Image (tube, rainbow, N blue to C red):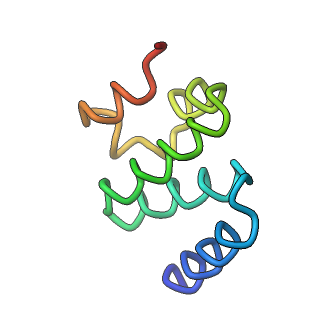
C-alpha cells in the first residue's frame, strides 16, 4: 500500500510540479517508511515552493522519527 501511495504521489508531482501538498505528503510517507533521506528531500522541495511549510513541518507529529535528525532541524529552523 505504501508503495502504491508513493507511486501515486510521484506521478502527481510530475503532473503538478508546483503542488506543495504533494511534496509534503511524500515527505510524511517517506518518513513513515523509514526513508529519512527521501523524506527530507521531499520536505526540502515543499519548503522551496512555500517557505511557510517549515513551521507546519516543525509542529507535525508525523515527523517524530526525524525530529532528532540534524538535517530536519536545519531544514525546519527559521532562516
Is 8 drawn above or below residue 27 in the view shown? Answer: below
Q: Could you tell me residue 16's position as x and y percent?
A: 75, 64
The answer to which image quadrant residue 5 occupies is bottom right
Name above or below for residue 35 compared with residue 50.
below
Q: Quadrant of residue 9?
A: bottom right
Q: Name the residue rendered at 45%, 26% in the picture.
A: 76
User: Going by the image, does 8 lie left or right of 15?
Assistant: left
Residue displayed at 74% across by 72% down:
15
Asked where in the image residue 11 lies, by quadrant, the reply is bottom right
On the image, the x and y values in percent for residue 22 come to 67, 59
Could you say where residue 49 lies in the image, as x and y percent from the top left?
65, 39
Residue 61 % position (x, y): 51, 39
Residue 37 lies, with reference to residue 56, above or below; the image says below
Image-based side of 23 in relation to 66, left or right:
right
Counting the numbered discs, the total is 0
**Towards the viewer: 33 or 24:** 24
Residue drawn 65% across the image and 71% down it:
14
Quarter of the image with the N terminus in it? bottom right
Q: Residue at x 39, y 48 (%)?
A: 40
Amino acid at each position: 500500500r505504501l508503495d502504491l501511495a508513493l507511486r501515486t504521489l510521484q506521478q502527481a508531482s510530475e503532473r503538478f510540479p508546483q503542488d506543495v501538498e504533494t511534496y509534503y505528503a511524500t515527505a510524511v510517507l517517506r518518513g513513515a517508511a523509514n526513508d529519512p533521506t527521501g523524506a527530507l528531500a521531499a520536505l526540502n522541495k515543499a519548503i522551496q515552493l512555500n517557505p511557510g511549510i517549515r513551521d507546519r513541518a516543525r509542529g507535525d507529529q508525523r515527523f517524530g522519527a526525524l525530529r532528532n535528525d540534524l538535517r530536519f532541524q536545519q531544514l525546519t529552523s527559521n532562516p
